[in-house]
């Protein structure tokens, strides 16, 4: 696990590749694990103190919350909510990737298309996805479709725009090499262009993935569509604080899992890339 | 003509008190392996000394110990008589990788005045000194306003040299400073260093793997070899004060010195100089 | 990619034609619309002009939003940079706190709204804190990465030339990390905007989010669209402002990067 960060652009030029910060060789992992555990325990203690000191019930303590969470995992509605969220998240993400990546690469390959769409994309990407939530909610109601529309419209931009950028990053040298060896165009696209663009595309997909999950839960929370977000809202309305906290924790855990999953996928896909060649500790 | 005033020396050359830098039984090991062992030498005021050895022998490690960036495992380094455990004022270092050692977000002038500003010199005075140092290495005010990465490799290294000179150091250390530039630029920079050293009465210790360069530049050549690296011998260079890239390098004396240093580095021990 | 700016009209036209065509298409396609949710573009523009181009309305609808996002974002950026520098420089601290921070930053900011309401009430302070909390993480993580990514050789440079710790921070570490810090600050801006809108839906202190919610509740569809447009423009303008600052501060980086690219 590492400190991944969300970034797409620096100075109008999207960042190159999502890289793990390099770690110097560590002689002993033991002390680190101890320190990390210590910090977590400290945080839990602070939480516990806060819950004890504040007027009863306002902030449920860690034990209360974990207990509730564990109890929830034995109930069916809990897994139903998790499944809803994961499904909505997955569908939106796939939609964004399937539309955003090819479209972005295609646009990025044409200078005219890139220039033409720049203003449109720039404007649309800065509209907070929340802004269209009320509208989509009116049209679709608190449903799965509503969530997917809101999330897709919000999360496609990092993926799309980064793909446009990725298309332009192709090593001119490789292009020349392909031309001099008279490599057929289709072959060039699949064997040279796409793998070359992949690292940059992955940066956008990483940001898009994080945004997808965030927006899914937000859309559920605010719009009432079934899922973890809706459970949080319902728990709040019912003044059931432990339940609310438990579901917030679930949201965080989902985020962690998505992060880990993404890094595992990236490592498989980009095992050849320089950023994965330096021995990554952790 | 001394533009920048010479560094402090209060003892006649030849006596041990005039040692600006002294390595005394210097040894260093890294991960249970001895890299350096029993390095003994000194650099006297106003000398141009070159440390030469094959690549990988441990020259950079040695230089890091000599500059105070690294504590040696054994032995000690003395700068102006005082034991050195961390970088001391009066030492300046010119790095091999000039492009990465200069700040890309600062102008050339700002880069050169950094050591001065760090030492508490006021802005106006620091800027003036920086411009003076740049003029010494042949760069004018227009260059001073540019960013380092807008310059060629040779000019960037001149900037690095100017930065080292700006604080009027007692000792100038140089880590393979001309290894990353082309042959023409290298010749120019070598001549620049000789001229500066004579004009400013600088004390210079330059590390290199290039034997020709070592012999051409120095008053004495310290040859390293072996594993762990040790001083094979110290060769006195008597080629006269005025040297020329073409003429000097084609003299028999030069060839003789070159051969001698070459043998020392290769391992066949030469005779004491 | 660089375009040859021999004639300025060309590039401008190239960037403008598509937006204009899209807007015009929308206008004509929706002109006779009787759909409830997709009113004619003309009525949307009318609502927009009425609600947002009116100075009196701006005071009630826009000003509170600007105050919230200004305070929250500033708080997030400052604290993010301070903590990021600290963690970036002290490696053991960063490693020790990493798991905790990974968990905390995975909490969706919006999900914390109910919790923050319970803890801090529904006044402006709560909203500022919530915005700051959500926007803090990208700044923090990017600052840490930026600090750690500063050219390692410069550490030797600053030691040899005896550059003091504060000067090192100001002249070497912060400038070196600044491209990455700005990347994090840009993400933080987008997050600030989202949380601001959401936070304004409670408490009734005005602002764009509140206006949007109200419009939805009272089924004023044109007004709602107008608010969406206003939000889009606000986001766009804030981004332009951000870019102006970034272009100025990171001028050296931009030029250096383009030089590296052209030498490829």
Image: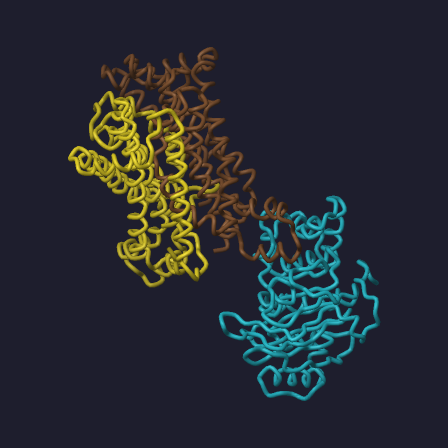
Question: In the rendered picture of this protein, how many numbered marks are placed on residues?
Answer: 0
- Quarter of the view holding residue B209: bottom right
Q: Residue at x 27, y 33 (%)?
A: A247
Looking at the image, can residue A237 be seen? yes
What is the display colour for chain C? brown
Q: Residue at x 39, y 21 (%)?
A: C200
Q: Residue at x 71, y 73 (%)?
A: B42
Indicate the quadrant containing the N terminus of chain C: top left, top right, bottom left or bottom right: top left
Which chain identifier belongs to the cyan chain?
B
Q: Is residue B272 above or below residue C93?
A: below
- Quarter of the view holding residue A126: top left
Q: Is residue C231 above or below residue B137?
A: above
Q: How is the image coloured?
A: by chain
Q: Is residue B202 above or below residue A256?
A: below
Residue A87 as seen in the image, left or right of residue A35 = left
Residue C200 as seen in the image, left or right of residue B241 = left
Residue A75 as seen in the image, left or right of residue B67 = left
Front-most of residues B88 and B143: B88
Front-most of residues C121 and B224: C121
- x and y percentages locating residue C146 in the rendered image: 49, 47
Residue A164 as seen in the image, left or right of residue B184 = left
What is the display colour for chain A? yellow
- x and y percentages locating residue C243 in the rendered image: 49, 35
Front-most of residues B168 and A233: A233
């Amino acid at each position: 696990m590492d400190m991944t960060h969300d970034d797409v652009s620096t100075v109008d030029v999207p960042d190159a590749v999502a890289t793990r910060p390099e770690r110097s060789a560590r002689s002993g992992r033991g002390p680190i694990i101890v320190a990390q555990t210590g910090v977590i325990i400290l945080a839990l203690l602070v939480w516990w103190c806060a819950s004890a000191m504040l007027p009863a019930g306002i902030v449920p303590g860690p034990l209360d919350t974990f207990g509730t969470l564990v109890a929830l995992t034995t109930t069916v509605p809990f897994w139903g909510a998790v499944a809803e969220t994961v499904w909505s998240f997955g569908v939106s993400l796939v939609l964004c990737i399937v539309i955003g990546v090819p479209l972005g690469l295609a646009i990025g390959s044409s200078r005219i298309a890139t220039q033409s769409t720049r203003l449109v994309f720039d404007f649309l990407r800065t509209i907070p996805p929340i802004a269209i939530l009320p509208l989509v909610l009116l049209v679709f109601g608190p449903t799965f479709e509503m969530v997917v529309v809101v999330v897709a419209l919000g999360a496609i931009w990092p993926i799309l725009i980064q793909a446009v950028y990725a298309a332009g990053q192709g090593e001119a040298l490789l292009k020349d090499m392909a031309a001099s060896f008279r490599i057929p165009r289709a072959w060039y696209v699949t064997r040279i262009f796409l793998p070359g663009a992949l690292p940059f595309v992955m940066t956008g997909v990483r940001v898009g993935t994080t945004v997808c999950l965030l927006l899914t839960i937000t859309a559920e929370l605010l719009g009432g569509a079934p899922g973890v977000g809706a459970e949080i809202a319902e728990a709040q309305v019912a003044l059931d604080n432990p339940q609310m906290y438990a579901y917030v924790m679930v949201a965080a855990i989902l985020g962690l899992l998505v992060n880990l999953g993404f890094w595992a996928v990236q490592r498989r896909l980009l095992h050849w890339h320089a950023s994965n060649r330096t021995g990554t500790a952790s | 003509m001394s533009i920048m005033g010479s560094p402090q020396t209060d003892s006649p050359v030849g006596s041990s008190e005039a040692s600006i830098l002294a390595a005394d039984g210097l040894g260093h090991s890294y991960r249970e392996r001895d890299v350096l062992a029993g390095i003994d030498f000194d650099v006297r005021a106003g000398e141009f000394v070159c440390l030469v050895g094959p690549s990988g022998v441990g020259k950079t490690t040695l230089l890091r110990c000599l500059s105070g960036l690294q504590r040696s495992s054994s032995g000690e380094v003395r700068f102006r008589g005082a034991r050195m455990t961390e970088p001391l004022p009066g030492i300046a270092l010119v790095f091999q990788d000039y492009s990465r050692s200069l700040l890309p977000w600062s102008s050339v002038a700002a880069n050169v005045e950094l050591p001065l500003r760090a030492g508490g010199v006021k802005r106006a005075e620091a800027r003036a000194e920086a411009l003076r140092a740049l003029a010494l290495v042949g760069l004018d005010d227009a260059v001073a306003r540019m960013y380092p990465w807008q310059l060629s490799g040779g000019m960037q290294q001149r900037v690095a040299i100017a930065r080292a000179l700006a604080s009027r150091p007692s000792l100038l250390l140089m880590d393979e400073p001309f290894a990353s530039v082309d042959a023409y630029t290298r010749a120019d920079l070598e001549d620049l260093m000789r001229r500066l050293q004579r004009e400013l009465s600088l004390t210079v210790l330059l590390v290199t793997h290039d034997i020709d360069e070592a012999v051409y530049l120095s008053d004495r050549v310290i040859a390293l070899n072996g594993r762990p690296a040790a001083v094979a011998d110290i060769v006195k260079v008597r080629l006269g004060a005025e040297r020329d890239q073409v003429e000097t390098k084609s003299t028999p004396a030069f060839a003789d010195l070159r051969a001698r240093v070459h043998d020392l580095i290769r391992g066949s021990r030469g005779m004491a100089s | 990619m660089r375009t040859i700016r021999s004639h300025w009209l060309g590039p401008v036209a190239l960037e403008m034609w598509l937006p204009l065509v899209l807007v015009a298409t929308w206008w004509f396609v929706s002109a006779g619309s009787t759909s409830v949710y997709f009113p004619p573009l003309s009525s949307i523009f009318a609502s927009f002009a009425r609600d947002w181009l009116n100075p009196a309305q701006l005071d009630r609808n826009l000003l509170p939003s600007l105050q919230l996002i200004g305070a929250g974002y500033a708080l997030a950026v400052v604290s993010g940079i301070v903590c990021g520098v600290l963690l970036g420089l002290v490696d053991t601290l960063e490693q020790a706190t990493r798991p905790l921070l990974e968990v905390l930053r995975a909490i969706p900011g919006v999900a914390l709204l109910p919790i923050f309401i319970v803890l801090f009430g529904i006044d402006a302070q709560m909203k500022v804190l919530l915005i700051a909390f959500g926007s803090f993480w990208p700044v923090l993580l990017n600052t840490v990465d930026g600090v750690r990514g500063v050219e390692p050789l410069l550490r030797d440079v600053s030691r040899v030339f005896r550059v003091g710790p504060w000067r090192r921070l100001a002249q070497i570490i912060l400038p070196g990390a600044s491209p990455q810090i700005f990347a994090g600050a840009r993400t933080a801006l987008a997050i600030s905007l989202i949380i601001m809108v959401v936070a304004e839906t409670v408490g009734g202190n005005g602002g764009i989010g509140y206006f949007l919610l109200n419009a939805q509740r009272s089924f004023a569809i044109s007004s709602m669209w107008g608010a969406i447009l206003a939000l889009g423009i606000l986001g766009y303008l804030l981004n332009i402002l951000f870019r102006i600052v970034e272009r100025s501060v990171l001028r050296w980086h931009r030029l250096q990067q383009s030089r590296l690219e052209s030498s490829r």
